[in-house]
Amino acid sequence: MLQIDGTAAFTILFAVFLILGFYGRYWRKGDLSKLDEWALGGRRFGAFIVWFLVGADLYTAYTFIAIPSSVFSIGAIYFFAVPYVAVTFGIAMWAMPKLWKVSKKEGHVTGADFVRKHFNSRSLAILVALVGIVAELPYIALQIVGMLSVMFVMLYGLGSIKLVSDLALILSFIILAIFTYFSGLRGATLTAIFKDAIILFTVALVIIVAVVNIGFTKSFQSLPVKYYHLLPLQVNAYWSLFLMSALALYLYPHAITGSLSAKDPKSLRISQSLLPLYGVGLALLALFGILAYGSSSTHAFLIQIPAASRGTYVVPALIFYTLPSWLTGVAFLGIFIGGLVPASIMAISQSNLLTRNIIKEIKPNLTSKGESLVAKVGTIIFLFIALGFVFLFPLSYSVQLQLLGGILILQTLPSVFLGLITNKLNKYGLMAGLIVGIGYGLYLMEVANHFKPWTTTLITMPPFNYPLFIGFIALLANLVVVLIISLIALPFSKKNTVTEN
Amino acid sequence: MMSSNSANVNKSKGLIIVISAILTIIPFFALIDIPFYNRTNPELGGLPFFYWYQILWLFVAAALFATAGIIYNRYGGE
């Protein structure tokens, strides 16, 4: 259990965090009853702020909990998150300024706005919006798992641990819901900078202390080959995981929201190009999964926990046994709000989709004030749906939550990314491809997991005789359908495509 | 807008696009060649090559992407 000075550090910094969250309401003040202002911060963030804002999506429970946990329990293959962040920004620095320009011109706030206008299809836009909303849910759920694991280590040994951590979790969520409601993206941005400063500081500190005191040589000593590098059979799984994750990141509604809040395409491009640096912290955190084997006290703590959920506590436990108590409190706060802030950003982008692309299609005469209200209420509802997800999925497979979201969101790639490049694709083809991709992806998830609870997103199936990420296979099926239908429809839709763009 | 550009400007803009594209694509090749870096040696402070090679590429990728972005922003247009 965390000592009094650690708990004090945690509490004081949490208070600072809340003040920043509420202060965000007044920062670079705009009319918050307008959706542009509330959700995009008025489209005037510079390169540095956007760097933090989009980077904040990187330092989430995915980084702190899911990846180190999987490296710890499965091995080197889950280091795929590093090449993923190295290449994803190479895609983003070209795609996102392009989307920014179209969005500024047409007043788009979401990816689905773009799809609706570009393909002149309400149904396709609604479909893309729905997929975006659903794909965010497991990702938000992962953030909650992260917060839960910090609370667990903090309160470990304090009687009924389940009750205490559940209560703490629900309380934090009510606080998050309230400040998200009042501050919108401005609040999330200020707190993102605060959170990342704390995290970068503590990650660096833990790595230095752990490497000096434990060292990699000792940590690797007792580990099998699959921790040193990939097994030959894992090579294809590796590239399919990192390339598909790289393609998926900027299809997520929250990443699009972050990018569109930039003040101009040039500063957006520079901020994206420098984001691989942000990934260094992610890489170091992944190595916590190895260093945990070298720290005997961490290992002693972890083996008390059932193997199925052990990995989830790797990072909090290693911090706890490496740093002095008050610094542990600081670090835990960083991880805790590292779940809260992204969850807030994700829920904001979900409700952008809900209001603009679903509710407004049904009720077009909604006032801008009404639109903003629906968005804010929607945010809170989504946060609570995601909270429900946590109780449905086993903790130990937290990384699969994010990868499941990836399989879903990837299916919007033809509509959004290919839509940026060409206007030759047929809207019915895109709809059919999207539905086929999602249906096939979910079916393969069932097959790969033998119709039991989902613990893997890899599958071995002909014509491939090695495991591959299901998202890749589903996207292939999706693209085949899109291309075939678009080719058939091309001669009939000449008129349609000329009027576009 | 395009018609007001002289042929010369278009030509140098094309060159800028090619250079930016090459700079952007290099990290992809470095990281997709998994068999090259999928090994233990040489280790760096006990860390297998597999790990530190990829971490190193985070820095190189940022440098290459930023160079591409700056060149493109300055000479290639928006």
Image (cartoon, rainbow, N blue to C red):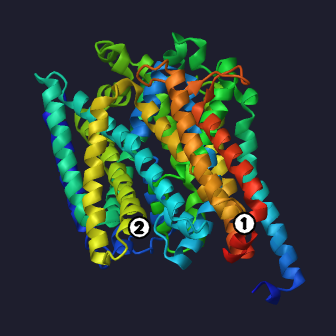
The quarter holding residue A299 reads top left
Q: What's the chain of the residue with tag 1?
A: A
Q: Position of residue A359 (x, y in %)?
A: 35, 64
Mark 2 = which residue? A361
Q: Is residue B47 above or below residue A34?
A: above
Work out whether residue A156 or residue A500 is closer to the camera in this orientation and state it: A500
Mark 1 = which residue? A493
Q: What's the chain of the residue with tag 2?
A: A
| Count of marks, rendered view | 2
The quarter holding residue B63 reads bottom right
Q: Amino acid at mark 2?
A: Glu
Work out whether residue A300 or residue A366 is closer to the camera in this orientation and state it: A366
- Categorize mark 1 by other alpha carbons within 10 Å: few (<14), some (14-19), many (20+): some
Q: Kindly state the secondary structure of the residue where label 1 is placed.
A: loop
Residue at image position (61%, 37%) is A474
Work out whether residue A89 or residue B56 is closer to the camera in this orientation and state it: A89
Quarter of the figure that contains the N terminus of chain A: top left
Residue A422 seen in this snapshot? yes
Q: Position of residue A22 (x, y in %)?
A: 22, 64
Residue A211 seen in this snapshot? no
Q: Residue farthest to the bottom?
A: B4
A425 left or right of A29 in image? right
Q: Kindly state the secondary structure of the residue where label 2 is placed.
A: helix
Residue at image position (75%, 69%) is A494
Q: Residue farthest to the left?
A: A159
Q: Are marks 2 and 1 on the same chain?
A: yes
Work out whether residue A325 or residue A301 is closer to the camera in this orientation and state it: A301
